[in-house]
Image (cartoon, helix red, strand yellow):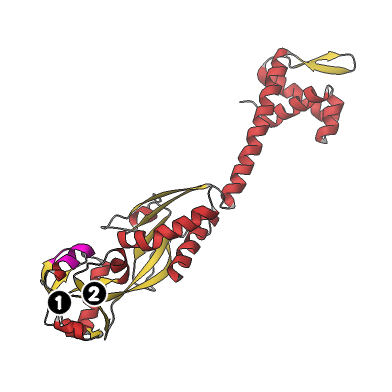
Amino acid sequence: MLDVRRLQVLRAVVNGGSVSAAATALGYTPSAISQQVAVLEKETGTALLERVGRGVRPTAAGRLLAEHAAVIERRVAEAGAALADLLAGRSGSLTVRYFATAGASLVAPAVAAFRADHPGVRLDLGMTDPEDPLDEVLQGRADLAVVVQPRDQDHPGLHLVHLLDDPYRAVLGKGHPLTAKRVLDLADLAGEPWVGSERPGVCQDTVLDACATAGFRPDFAVDSEDYPTAQGFVAAGLGVALVPLLGLAARRHPGVTVRRLRAPEPVRSIHAAVRRTAWGRPALTRLVAALQATARA
């Protein structure tokens, strides 16, 4: 294996035409330069310089190695510049995962703003695994995931940044008697058939916990596991549903009426999840800042 530093010494001798010129350029003594060239010649097993008057000139092997040394020096400089860009957040790549309603209303505008300021950072965007939305981040396959998690809940190995609280709304069919009220107590829905809008997990638990606080358990007549389908069943008069604001922003069925809730108002908390070991990377923290700014807008 050739020593890169000795190659640079050889290149300085070839460019300067003498050992003394190379010593002056590199800040070494002439004897140190001669020693470095001698070791390189021993490593290569061939002469690299030949004397010409008071100076030296490269042999064919010496000229070849000096040319490669110039290429190496450029590549090392490029590597240093690329590393500086990466550490400053001007380049690199980020893998981002999100769930559907957050993707449309939160992630998309945040990514657009981030790309405008950081065009050199490549983004790999995709949906989270609904069964385990944090796994890709924990395993290092994703840098950030936008997820629903209870507030103030600690996850080993993860740094959670709160983005926004997304309150649920009551979704009623047009003409339902409860549409006469502008704000509903959650208990007003206790005797109604329900259309399920959530798959099992944190979001469904948020709804069920709120209903338990209001003193009842919903009677699910239909199970849909997504917001547009749930609204379709509600519009057809088959029950009532709870849908978060982001779900309604993405798509609102024309055949439903939406009302605020209280006592209590179910709220899901949306966070950006990042590995603790990755937190602090400039590009990553700036993407989180873009998500926070979008959430506040």
The residue pinned by badge 1 equals 218
In the image, residue 38 above or below residue 205:
above
Could you tell whether 116 is left or right of 106 in the image?
Answer: right
Q: Which residue is mark 2?
A: 207
The residue at 72%/18% (across/down) is 63
Residue 199 falls inside the magenta stretch: no
Magenta-span inclusion, residue 226? yes
Q: Are marks 1 and 2 in contact (CB under 8 Å)?
A: yes
Please state the extent of the stretch shown in magenta in the rendering. Answer: 223-232
Q: Is residue 83 left or right of residue 285?
A: right
Res 22 quadrant in image: top right
Provide residue 156's location: percent of width, then percent of height.
Answer: 39, 63
Helix, strand or loop for disc 2? helix
Q: Amino acid at mark 2?
A: Val
Q: What secondary structure do most residues of the magenta stretch adopt? A: helix
The answer to whether residue 264 is above or below residue 294 is: below
* Residue count near mark 2 (Cα–Cα under 10 Å), binned few <14, some 14–19, many ≥20: many
Name the side, left or right, on which 139 lies relative to 181. Answer: right
| Residue 15 relative to residue 139: left or right | right
Q: Position of residue 118 (x, y in %)?
A: 54, 52
